[in-house]
Amino acid sequence: MKALIIEDETAAARNLAAILRTSAPEVEVVATLESVAESIEWLRTNPQPDLLFMDIHLADGDSFRIFDAVEITSPVIFTTAYDQYALEAFKVNSIDYLLKPLNEADVHRALTKWQRLTSAERHSYGSRVRTMASARHDREEVFLVHVRDRIIPLHREQIAYCYTSNERVTAYGYDGAAYPLDRTLEMLQATLPATDFFRANRQFIIARRAVKEIVVWFGSRLALHLTVETPERIIISKARVPEFKAWLKAVHPDE
């Protein structure tokens, strides 16, 4: 059995590979990939593996974006740190997942489950995974923001950008209003549609409607100016520039 690991944490990838060597020597890890972009390229140019271990949150975005670019026919076992929203989606759709840190018993359980599935059951499972992946972008249109003794509905089209500082995440509207959120940027990245929102760096998720101007910055990086003020300059790293430009071209094809 050939397996592909998609995981951007080196230690976690090595741990999974070591567990497979010990508890499932029949499984050959054909590649370990670290990003959405790298995974899309690999899956487009290589035969699909028998099994795919996929982390949810990768350095360059939500791994569900891979399903938007490639038709994945391989069975998928997701791996994740504790993510309340992802786990709820997995349970509702009966999708298999492994909670980090991974251990040998859980990996063995997942593999045993797969070996017992019939061809028809595997096909049905794959359909559920693809349906869940396509629905991720539409699953939450309104966020409930708790401010003192009030609950304020925040529609996602109101969000110009999300910003994290000192382990606190705040969404900012186009009117400059601030809305404290009780989730991480990683959770928001998994919820907000990738067509409309982009993870610029570790501090910012930006809405495409909010992008006002792009400036070439030092070291082939980009600096973004939004239609609203931001607490610090938004910098796109050199490595992320091609992905950012592709995202802009996708939503503004005439530019």
Image: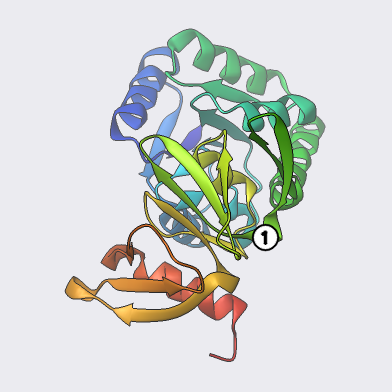
Q: Secondary structure beneath disc 1?
A: helix
Dot 1 corresponds to which residue?
158
Is residue 158 found left or right of 201 in the rendered image?
Answer: right
Q: Which is nearer the eye, 219 or 18? A: 219
Residue at position x 67%, y 60% in the image: 158
Residue at position x 78%, y 31% in the image: 93
Q: Which is nearer the eye, 7 or 219? A: 219
Q: Is residue 44 above or below residue 47?
A: below
Q: Residue furthest front?
A: 149
Q: Where is residue 176 shown, x and y percent of the image? A: 55, 61
Q: Is residue 233 above or below residue 80?
A: below
Q: Where is residue 134 shown, x and y percent of the image? A: 72, 51
Residue at position x 51%, y 29% in the image: 80
Report whether residue 88 is seen. Answer: yes
Q: Which is nearer the eye, 222 or 17? A: 222
Q: Where is residue 52 shown, x and y percent of the image? A: 54, 37
Is residue 50 found left or right of 141 in the rendered image?
Answer: left
Q: Residue furthest left?
A: 219
